[in-house]
């Protein structure tokens, strides 16, 4: 049986807490679901609370694993705010280019992600670090929306 000391990686938890704060979350919660069981079977979770959204990683063997999983979920496939490239983790292949939305709600198409390139992130001790350096390149071009068609006067007006 593992002890709580074997399960706890303080750097992973501090790095996740720092990253969650940097992403604009209002709250980070780490906890477990099951009482009176061995620590590794308690069903640990980590969740970040944003305005109107909650992102959760659950059913992990310890608090560090839950925090690390949450950090990876927040990063993978997002957009680096420094270089505007698609975020990938140093030990994983780049995220699949899928249509979706960024954390702030802006639409991020597969074409935009592909055109942006990849920014490789990694955890160094108690902080997640971006892989891009140097001056900030211009942001990827935004997709232009078609202008709305003007309609004539309403009938009966």
Image (cartoon, helix red, strand yellow):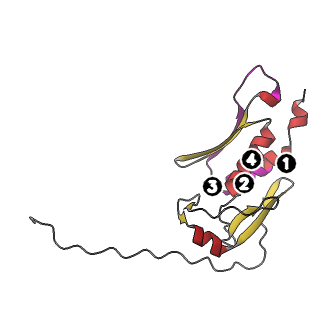
Look at the numbered disc 3 and give the secondary structure of its residue.
Answer: loop
Q: Is residue 21 above or below residue 146?
A: above
What's the CA distance linking mark 3 and mark 1? 20 Å
Q: Secondary structure at mark 2?
A: helix
Instruction: Return the mark for residue 24.
Output: 3
Image location (x, y in percent) of residue 62: 80, 36
Screen quadrant of the N terminus: top right
Q: CA distance from mark 3 to mark 2?
A: 9 Å
- Mark 4 and mark 2: Cα distance apart in space: 12 Å
Residue 11 numbered tag: 1
| Disc 4 and disc 2 in contact, CB within 8 angstroms | no
Quadrant hosting residue 88: bottom right
Nearer to me, 114 or 154: 114
Magenta residue check for 6? no
Spatial distance from mark 1 to mark 2, Cα to Cα? 12 Å
Pointer 3: residues within 10 angstroms few (<14), some, or many (20+)? some
Q: Which residues are magenta?
A: 15-39
In magenta segment, residue 37: yes
Q: Nearer the viewer, residue 28 or 92?
A: 92
Tag 2 or tag 3, which sits nearer the N-term? 2
- In the picture as drawn, the residue positioned furthest to the top comes out as 36
SS at circle 4: helix
Neighbours of disc 4 within 10 Å: few (<14), some (14-19), many (20+): many
Mark 1 vs 4: CB contact within 8 A:
no
Dot 3 and dot 1 residues touching (CB under 8 Å): no
Q: Which residue appears at 43% of the width and 74% of the height? A: 145
Locate residue 13: give its quadrant. top right
């Amino acid at each position: 049986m593992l002890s709580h000391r074997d399960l706890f990686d303080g750097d992973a938890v501090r790095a996740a807490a720092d990253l969650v704060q940097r992403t604009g979350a209002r709250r980070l919660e780490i906890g477990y679901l099951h009482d009176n069981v061995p620590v590794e079977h308690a069903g640990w979770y980590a969740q970040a609370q944003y305005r109107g959204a909650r992102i959760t990683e659950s059913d992990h063997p310890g608090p560090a694993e839950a925090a690390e999983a949450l950090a990876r979920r927040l990063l993978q496939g997002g957009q680096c705010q420094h270089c505007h490239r698609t975020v990938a983790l140093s030990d994983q292949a780049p995220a699949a280019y899928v249509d979706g939305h960024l954390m702030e709600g802006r639409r991020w198409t597969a074409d935009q992600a592909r055109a942006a390139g990849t920014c490789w992130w990694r955890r160094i001790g108690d902080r997640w670090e971006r892989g891009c350096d140097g001056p900030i390149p211009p942001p990827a071009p935004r997709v232009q929306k078609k202008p709305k068609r003007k309609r004539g006067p309403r009938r009966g007006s």
